[in-house]
Image (cartoon, rainbow, N blue to C red):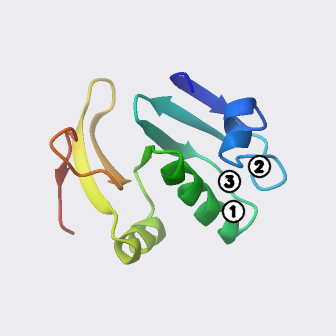
Amino acid sequence: MTDGIINIDTEPARLLEFTSDKFNPASYLWKTGDTIVISFIMAKTKSAFCQLIKNITAEGFYFEIPTPSNRMKEIGEKQGWHYCQREHEELGLINFLTNKLSPGNTGQEIKQ
């Protein structure tokens, strides 16, 4: 899978079951290296989002969810995800949820 945007219903999207029957057609993902950024999706059901997370990790990718809502932070805490922050060259300091907290993660885990 190449880096860049993953539009819904494309071949890479189908691999992750990121399809228009489960998500709003305006949704998209972004891949950079071993990480898929989930920043603009609208799942039609709760189970579709959970399955997307499972599919991303099953394919060997990490995920990041930038500027998560309070509800998403609650979900992340229950799932054991990490709430981190780092400096973005264009956006400044960003908060995000991720399943990747390792020496390769430039983020620093923060507590609420």
Residue matched to label 1: 48
Going 40% across and 72% down the picture, which residue do you hit?
79
Percent x, y of residue 1:
57, 27
Q: How many marks?
A: 3
Dot 1 alpha-carbon crowd within 10 angstroms: few under 14, some 14 to 19, many 20 or more: some
| Label 3 residue SS | loop
Horizontal side, residue 64 vs residue 47: left or right: left
Residue type at mark 2 is Asn
Q: Which quadrant of the view contains residue 49?
A: bottom right
Q: Which quadrant of the view contains residue 61?
A: top left
Of 91 and 23, nearer the camera is: 23
Horizontal side, residue 21 vs residue 80: left or right: right
Q: Using the image, determine if residue 39 lies above or below residue 45.
A: above
Going 70% across and 46% down the picture, which residue do you hit?
18
The first of marks 2 and 1 along the sequence is 2
Percent x, y of residue 16:
65, 46
| Separation of residues labelled 1 and 3 (CA atoms) | 10 Å
